[in-house]
């Protein structure tokens, strides 16, 4: 009988096509708004920032990142845009990739959401990820393997950004990240309907119970979450954060032996 070998081969092909479950993504409602929430164990998973390929060209799309990783035997388990950028997709604030700084830390106030101080830094170090308010980061002496600066902060030491208004009528699709005090829990969120800064910050503080959270961006926000069947496409992005896993190639060859 050949049923068992054929079944093993099919299982092997399925494992090759599917990334490991490195991220827990789910849709939730809170306080009348809908969100997609992706939780990452930063102590265990391979969180990376992306901007340029080896030639220096901006990758800009989840599909481009996936192609680049596939050539290295890896896959993208989750990704989202991670910080504001200029028209040429260069980062507005601090950007460090694998120890190489492309843009320096910006500490002065300015126009737009990025300049609505306090803003902050999403910092990746071995086995942890942290959101840190910009001036606290500047004074801390912390060295990040990779980092991206964005703003405004959503939650600072358990408090909402002081400029957020409960009755604000400014509502957009928004995405951001919050981290636990020990740096092991990184939670990425994108709203499924337009929300205010107050509502978005409250989600991180009151529902997710995270002491620090940072806004990434608004209407341009996109998500790659294969386990939810979601792979948002559109115009080119700047910085992207994602979880990388080995591409699994098992079963098919063994089934033929």
Image: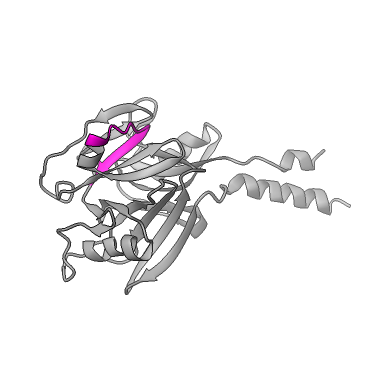
Can you see residue 85?
Answer: no
- The quadrant of the picture occupied by the C terminus is top right
Residue 141 on the magenta span = yes
In the figure, residue 89 lies in which quadrant?
A: top left
In the figure, residue 123 lies in which quadrant?
A: top left
Residue 198, compared with residue 132, is above or below; it is: below
Can you see residue 147?
Answer: yes
The one of 45 and 132 positioned closer to us in this rendering: 132
Report the residue at 22% width, 35% height from top.
139
Way the structure is coloured: one colour
Report the residue at 16% width, 38% height from top.
107
**Position of 86 compared to 23: left or right?**
left
Residue 201, compared with residue 105, is above or below; it is: below
Indicate the position of residue 81 as horizontal and vertical percent values: 33, 47
In the figure, residue 106 lies in which quadrant?
A: top left
Residue 170 on the magenta span = no
Report the residue at 80% width, 40% height from top.
256
**Position of 129 compared to 195: left or right?**
right
Magenta region, residue range: 139-150
Indicate the position of residue 117 as horizontal and vertical percent values: 15, 48
The one of 46 and 77 positioned closer to us in this rendering: 46
**Residue reaching furthest to the bottom:** 32
Residue 73, compared with residue 226, is above or below; it is: above
Report the residue at 72% width, 43% height from top.
251
Number of marks: 0
Indicate the position of residue 73 as horizontal and vertical percent values: 56, 34
**Position of 190 compared to 89: left or right?**
right
């Amino acid at each position: 009988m050949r049923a068992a070998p054929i079944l093993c081969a099919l299982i092997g092909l399925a494992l090759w096509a599917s990334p490991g479950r490195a991220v827990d993504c789910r849709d939730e409602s809170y306080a009348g708004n809908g969100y997609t929430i992706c939780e990452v164990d930063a102590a265990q998973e391979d969180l990376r920032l992306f901007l340029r390929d080896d030639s220096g060209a901006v990758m800009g799309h989840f599909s481009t990142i996936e192609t680049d990783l596939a050539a290295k035997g890896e896959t993208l388990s989750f990704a989202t845009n991670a910080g504001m950028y200029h028209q040429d997709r260069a980062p507005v604030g601090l950007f460090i990739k694998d120890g190489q700084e492309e843009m320096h830390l910006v500490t002065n106030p300015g126009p737009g959401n990025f300049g609505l101080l306090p803003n902050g830094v999403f910092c990746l170090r071995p086995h942890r990820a942290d959101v840190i308010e910009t001036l606290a980061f500047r004074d801390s002496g912390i060295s990040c393997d990779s980092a991206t600066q964005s703003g405004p902060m959503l939650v600072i030491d358990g408090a909402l950004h002081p400029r957020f208004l409960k009755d604000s009528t400014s509502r957009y699709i928004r995405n951001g990240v919050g981290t636990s005090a020990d740096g092991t829990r990184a939670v990425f969120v994108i709203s499924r309907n337009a929300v205010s800064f107050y509502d978005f910050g409250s989600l991180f503080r009151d529902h997710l119970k995270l002491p620090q959270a940072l806004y990434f961006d608004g209407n341009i926000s996109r998500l790659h979450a294969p386990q939810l069947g979601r792979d948002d496409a559109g115009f080119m992005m700047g910085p992207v954060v994602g979880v990388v896993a080995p591409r699994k190639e098992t079963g098919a060859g063994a089934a033929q032996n």
